[in-house]
Image (spheres, rainbow, N blue to C red):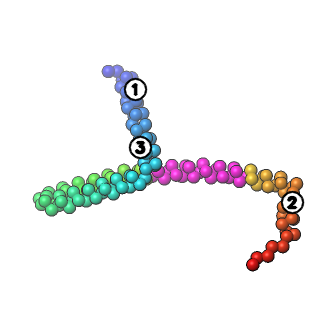
Amino acid sequence: MTLKRFRKGFKDFLDEIGLIWLNFKDFFYEHKSLFDLFFHLLYSCIILGWVFGSYFGGDYILLISALFASLFMIIRGVEKLCDDSRNARHRKEKNVMSASYNKLDSRYTGVRKVIARFYPIKSRLSRKKVRFK
């Protein structure tokens, strides 16, 4: 196998992993409650495994506790990574919506100025006396 062929195969492999990750992020973004439930069930199973392992493990309590801590930290890291990507997508969508809003607001302000030149709204409204009951 040549180095060029290896690089192409490795690049294709990384592209495939990237595509899988993007699909996973989109699925996580759309189904946040499902993932929350999944992570809570996973945490519960790990804690139950730790409790039973501690009770029945006896001599291996240190190993069981180390495995529990490692699994817990790995799962927490994956959950944080998913949440961070979800929050980044929220921020990106918020920025796009904010830019759209600012553009529409500036157009609306320009239209109001043009209308005010032809039909002075403020002067008409100021003459009306409004009574509140």
x, y (%) of residue 70? 27, 54
**Residue 75, which numbered label?**
none
Residue drawn at x 31%, y 56% as measured from the top left: 41
From where the camera sits, is residue 66 visible? no
Q: Are marks 2 and 3 in contact (CB under 8 Å)?
A: no
Q: Nearer the viewer, residue 4 or 100?
A: 100
Of labels 1 and 3, earlier in sequence is 1
Label 2: few (<14), some (14–19) or many (≥20) C-alpha neighbours in 10 Å: few
Nearer to me, 9 or 106: 106
Dividing the picture into quadrants, the one containing residue 48 is bottom left
Asked if residue 122 lies left or right of residue 23, the reply is: right
Pair 1/2: label in front = 2
Disc 2 marks a residue whose amino acid type is Pro
Q: Which residues are magenta?
A: 84-106
Badge 3 marks a residue whose secondary structure is helix
Mark 2 or mark 3, which is nearer to you?
2
- In the rendered view, tell whether residue 44 sits above or below residue 127: above
Residue under numbered circle 2: 120
Q: Is residue 87 left or right of residue 65?
A: right
What's the magenta bit mostly, secondary-structure-wise?
A: helix
Q: Identify the mark at residue 8; answer none if there is no mark.
A: 1
Looking at the rendered structure, which numbered label has been put on residue 24?
3
Q: Earlier in the sequence, mark 2 or mark 3?
A: 3
Q: Quadrant of the N terminus?
A: top left
Q: Amino acid at mark 3?
A: Phe
Q: What whole-number distance in Å separates the C-alpha atoms at marks 1 and 3?
A: 24 Å
Q: From this viewpoint, is residue 56 visible?
A: yes
Task: Name the secondary structure under disc 1.
Answer: helix
**Residue at (83, 52) in percent of width and height:** 114
Q: Quadrant of the C terminus?
A: bottom right
- Spatial separation of the CA atoms under disc 1 and disc 2: 69 Å
